[in-house]
Amino acid sequence: MNQNQVKGTIDQAVGSAKREAGEWAGDGQLQVEGMVQQVKGKVESAWGKAKEVVHEANEEAKVEHESRIKVELECASSSLESSKKK
């Protein structure tokens, strides 16, 4: 969980509390503020999740790239060794 996801979760919880407090108090303005903050939190959480997915994909691609380079170097090395033996 990254910073955006944490902030989004907090905004959702605070927004929910504001919305419910507004309902209990009959304060329409507080209800709207709460709903807006909840939506903001959901968007922030989704943004954080998207960033996390992209980061994980980049890390996976980096590992695959490094593995491919290692295999190619090993193949080139064994090819050179076999050509020296001839």
Image (spheres, helix red, strand yellow):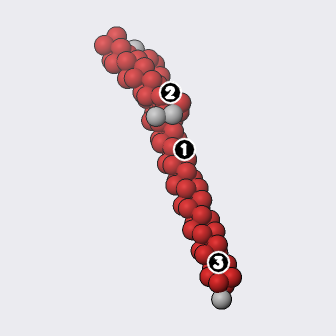
Q: Residue at 60% x, 75% y: name it.
A: 78
Which of labels 1 and 2 is toward the front? 1
- Image quarter hosting the C terminus: bottom right
Are the residues flagged by discs 2 and 3 in contact, CB closer than 8 Å?
no
Are the residues flagged by discs 3 and 1 in contact, CB closer than 8 Å?
no
**Which one is nearer the viewer's eye here, 17 or 65?**
65
Label 2 is placed on what type of residue? Lys
Observer able to see residue 28: no
> Secondary structure under badge 1?
helix
Q: Earlier in the sequence, mark 1 or mark 2?
A: 2
Label 3 is placed on what type of residue? Glu
Q: To which residue does mark 3 refer?
A: 81
Q: Earlier in the sequence, mark 3 or mark 1?
A: 1
Q: x, y (%) of residue 22?
A: 37, 16
Q: Residue at 51% x, 49% y: name it.
A: 56
| Disc 3 residue crowd, few under 14, some 14–19, many 20+, Cα 10 Å | few
> Secondary structure under badge 2?
helix
> Which mark is on residue 40?
none
Q: Is residue 80 left or right of residue 15?
A: right
Label 1 is placed on what type of residue? Lys
Whether 42 is drawn above or below 76: the answer is: above
**Which one is nearer the viewer's eye here, 47 or 16?**
47
Q: Earlier in the sequence, mark 2 or mark 3?
A: 2
Q: x, y (%) of residue 59?
A: 55, 51
Q: What is the CA distance from the residue labelled 3 to the residue labelled 1?
A: 45 Å
Q: To which residue does mark 2 refer?
A: 7
Q: Is residue 25 left or right of residue 37?
A: left
Which of labels 3 and 1 is toward the front? 3
> Which mark is on residue 51?
1
| Disc 1 residue crowd, few under 14, some 14–19, many 20+, Cα 10 Å | some
Q: Check the image and name the residue furthest to the left.
A: 24
> Secondary structure under badge 3?
helix
